[in-house]
Image (cartoon, rainbow, N blue to C red):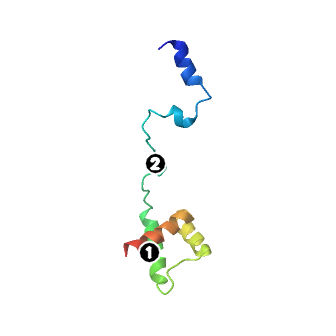
Amino acid sequence: MSKTSIDKITNDTNISPDEKDENVPNIKKSKRKGKSKIPKRAVTVLKNWLTEHLHDPYPTHSEKNALAIEAGITRKQVSFSYLNFFKEK
């Protein structure tokens, strides 16, 4: 293949993305990063809250914010931690 042919192929903007990747296997990279563990202190804080609130084990938004600050993790991590606690039981 000549250099002009290669340049034409690599610079051709009239080819749709599907046509460009026709011979390339479809490999999707996962956007998900590895499982991140929260610190043991955070787990202790969350489990203590849970044992104190067994009658109503679902923290409100403000309680999640307070737990996140106390545990040193994000609010999202608090939410997922409680989902995982209940999934394990």
Q: Would you name the residue on which mark 1 appears?
A: 47
Residue placed at 57% from the left, 72% from the top?
A: 64
Q: Nearer the viewer, residue 86 or 51?
A: 86
For residue 36, above or below residue 80: above
For residue 89, above or below residue 54: above
At which x and y percent is residue 52? 48, 83
For residue 82, above or below residue 18: below
Alpha carbon separation for disc pair 1 and 2 = 31 Å
Residue placed at 49% from the left, 87% from the top?
A: 55
Residue placed at 46% from the left, 84% from the top?
A: 54
What is the tally of numbered marks visible in this picture?
2
Q: Would you name the residue on which mark 2 appears?
A: 30
At which x and y percent is residue 66? 58, 71
Residue 34, label in figure: none
* CA neighbours of label 1 inside 10 A, class few (<14), some (14 to 19), many (20+): some
* Left or right: 27 as drawn, with respect to 75: left
Give the mark toward the camera: 1 or 2. Answer: 2
Disc 2 marks a residue whose amino acid type is: Ser
Q: Residue furthest bottom?
A: 55
At which x and y percent is residue 78? 51, 68
SS under mark 2: loop
At which x and y percent is residue 74? 55, 62
Disc 1 marks a residue whose amino acid type is: Lys
Quarter of the image with the C terminus is bottom left
Residue placed at 61% from the left, 73% from the top?
A: 61
For residue 76, above or below residue 8: below
SS under mark 1: helix
Q: In which quarter of the image is residue 9?
A: top right
Q: Nearer the viewer, residue 86 or 68?
A: 86
* CA neighbours of label 2 inside 10 A, class few (<14), some (14 to 19), many (20+): few
Disc with the residue nearer the chain's start (1 vs 2): 2
